[in-house]
Amino acid sequence: MIYFDSSATSLLKPATVAEAVSYAIGHFGNAGRSFYDAVMEANREIFYTRMEIAELIGLSDPLQVAYTSSATESLNLIIGSLIQPQDAVITTVTEHNSVLRPLYLKGCQLSFLPCDAAGKLKVDEFEGLVQGSTKFLVCSHGSNVTGNITDTDSLRQLCRKHNITMILDISQTFGSCPVDISMADVFCFTGHKGLLGPQGVGGIIVNGDLDFNIVKTGGAGSKSFDRFQEAKMPDVFEAGTLNAPGIYGLQKGVQFIKSVGLEAIAARENHLARLFYEGIKELPGLTIVGDWQAADRLPLVSLKFDGLDSSDLAALLWQDYRIATRAGSHCAPLLHRHFGTVRTGLVRFSFSYFNTEAEIERGIEALHTISKG
Amino acid sequence: MEYIITFENTHFAILSERHLLGAGLAVNVLPLPSQLSAGCGICLRLKPQIIGEALKALKALEIGKIGLYKRNADDEKNYEEVGDRENFIKGVENNNGKSACQYRQ
């Protein structure tokens, strides 16, 4: 198999991740629930993983990192905890359903920042969406369809100017390109994409003090006679047993990233994506979405051929070439409506540090052959 | 005699254990004795000879409010709270004739 679906999950991971998960299953007790060796080992590794994540994003207090099961759960919890139905919220037309659906469910007043023909957000239209009751901006740091990276510097300045809390979905960027704590007030991340950890672990990172409402509650391992757990990080979002094997695996993924260097990983992934793009961009009948003038992009290419449904293209790639891609709408309905690809979908090729130039060449050859009919 | 340090939550207990072990101070994790009240169900046990050094080391950490208790004998059931920490630390430094090195890891 040639795996070009790393935006979905990092199938290609360092060996230490699986080793850590396997070790934890046989050795870790239930963290925070007792004191003997198996529990203390779990306690320590969970804490050390917080430290690794905090260091990666430039955060000084590791207790501002809370674990969840996924970025989707993180967004649900944060939106549920912070946003009230009477709040006005700005989001964008480039968002994944993990951002859109919790906002729809909240019932708050939504405004959508539009994008241009290349899927680049029209940041200059942001202030036109701000009302007196606008309290939040919820948006992604990078698009899982276009690969465009959001201009967070400009949005952060605008949010500060208008006293708007900025919630950033870093699912596609954390571990693949620089993410800094100064970019937003709240970050929602997943462990199984760029961070190279296992599925089933994600988190929330908070920059500063925010007033959380408890939206997930249950056993927290301490203060059992209090009616609820503390409404502060990280316990406010961590009721119940943590996915300690997943968290330990995540630790190894983050350590791998640090050992190689984030810049080296980003450079390699971008090199592979550009190599693929340059090899196919002139094919007849091909449309590639995204802002390819930008120097910084996510390592993915989303495309379609005229007259060929994305699912048929993806099926050909798998059946004839064993190339794994993702076809369809990528859980980004508004962006596909913008591109006019609701009926046809797009096929996304997303690359990882572990892909090779030979695999890229094979993908290019495959599309050249398919384009000839 | 032994001392018990209690914490508001498990995170602070883990952070403190790591910090003290990193400073070469021998600490043990215990379940919180039922007669003591604290937010966290685990506590750290230390020998008298290093308690002063440990308290000073913990001052550098942001770990919320800690509790400090002593028990005069292993079989004694009652823990006595140590209230005045500053004078306690000074007293330990003045009276502790033994080197703490033998309790280092």
Image (cartoon, coloured by chain):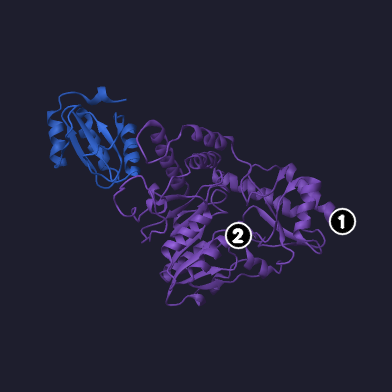
- The residue identified by callout 2 is A143
Q: Is residue A284 left or right of residue A274?
A: right
- Give the x, y percent position of residue A220: 37, 48
Q: Amino acid at mark 2?
A: Ser
- The disc label shown at residue A92, or none: none
Q: Is residue A373 left or right of residue A175?
A: right
Q: Chain of mark 2?
A: A
Mark 2 is surrounded, within 10 Å at the Cα level, by few (under 14), some (14 to 19) or many (20 or more) other residues, namely many
- Look at chain A in the picture and name its colour: purple
Q: Is residue A58 visible?
A: no
- The residue identified by callout 1 is A372
| The chain coloured blue in the image | B
Q: CA distance from mark 1 to mark 2?
A: 30 Å
Q: Are marks 1 and 2 in contact (CB under 8 Å)?
A: no
- Give the x, y percent position of residue A313: 78, 56
Say which residue appears at 56% left-offset and 53% top-offset: A173
Q: Is residue B40 above or below residue A230?
A: above
Q: Quadrant of residue A97?
A: bottom right
